[in-house]
Image (cartoon, rainbow, N blue to C red):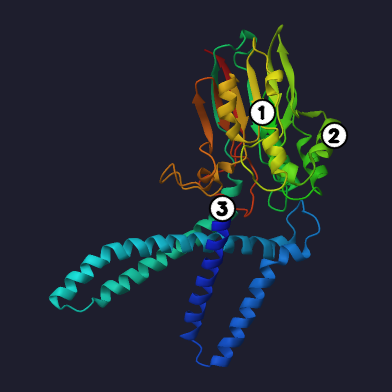
Amino acid sequence: MGIFDAILLLFAVSQLYWFWRGWVWMSKRVRARAIRAVVAAAALAAYLLLFNFEWLTRRATPVRLTPTELLFGAPFSWWMASSLFSFLLLLLFWGVTAVIRAPLWAARKARGHSPDPSRRAFLARTGNVVAAAPFLGGAYGLLYGRLNLETPRQPIRLPRLPRAFDGFRIAQLSDIHIGPFMTEEEIRKFVGIANALKPDLVVLTGDFVTWDSSPQQAVVRALSGLRAPFGVFGCLGNHDAWARVEGSITALFAQVGIRILRHQNVAITSGGESFNLMGIDFASRRQMGPHSEAFVQRFFNGLGGLMAPDRVNILLSHNPDTFDRAAEMGIDLSLAGHTHGGQAALEFISPQIAPSRLVTPYVSGLFEKPGGQLYVNRGIGTIGVPIRIGAPPEITLFELKRG
């Protein structure tokens, strides 16, 4: 069983648990069995309708927040994420409680003491607080966390950097995922913020759309306002491949002066000196969804021909897992996205509590190893559920330094 299969199984079990809790709650308040059965059937029908609502009604990804998404899509997405995390927290709470209570129960039984009702009531109240926390956190992530943009300024020291580029500024945007919760209008606001950082160069590291091709023109329109003296360049992500827009969106970007590097390189020149900027399509050593064979086959295939051994090489690669091979090849700096920083991460509690750590050690921020450096941008969009907790959206401004 794969990771995603396990998550789906856990989600199904969590929903059964919440239906059971709802049935118990209703049984204490509604005496008539027939009424309980009708209410339960109506609740189940409404749940199944909401669960399939998006697939039944959507023909194309909306690029603005529609009344349907506001009234149905957002609340149900909040429920899906919050109910799953609440269930997992309750499992942990029950497990810890059982480990602690077992020796105490054995000691009381040996002394002939009866259970303490007040202790049981306290544990029940604590369990309710534990269960409520993810629902409150999910509401925060939906209403505030997903829009709480950060603009970190990250110095990057490169020993081979030409003097002409000392202090050169690069702005990175990633994982746009245009849709009802990352609208065309919202993207334009982020474009304005990026321009206000006054970068010399702007890079885009993939996942402009999510599941279908319909919003590709809107996302290109929204990003066409990006401005930088040395231009705007980008690469493509796995969702761009899954939506089958790799060729079409590249052409649309070209029409507005943005160049998508598809296994290509370009020299960025200033004062007679230059560095080598490279970009590749999504590549992975792991099978993951449609087009996985292409992802694996093109993993760094022929990239050596794009490198400039006598210059600084900067790689745009949506997948941060390409960093291991990039460092081996001596690529000075890799810029990636893909992970959303975990999207729902509790790294303020522990650095390990982020869903993305299940599939990559490179979740967000700066990484270094012999041969190169990597920066993983958390992106500005969301996937699955429009919630961010502990992983705020990000536009990064890099300042290249000699040394």
Instruction: Please name which of the two marks, 1 or 2, marks the residue nearer to the observer.
Output: 1
Image position of 388 (left or right of 252):
left
Relative to the observer, which residue lies in front, 338 or 380? Answer: 338
Name the residue tied to disc 1: 300
Name the residue tied to disc 3: 2
Instruction: Identify whether 111 is placed above or below 166.
Output: below
Closer to the chain start, of discs 1 and 3, is: 3
Image position of 158 (left or right of 243):
left
Q: Residues within 10 Å of mark 2 (few under 14, many from 20)?
A: some
Instruction: Identify whether 109 is placed above or below 154.
Output: below
Number of labelled discs? 3
Closer to the chain start, of discs 2 and 3, is: 3
Element at badge 2?
Answer: helix
The Cα–Cα distance between marks 1 and 2, rounded to whole angstroms, is: 23 Å
The type of residue carrying mark 3 is Gly
The type of residue carrying mark 1 is Phe
Name the residue tied to disc 2: 251
Closer to the chain start, of discs 1 and 2, is: 2
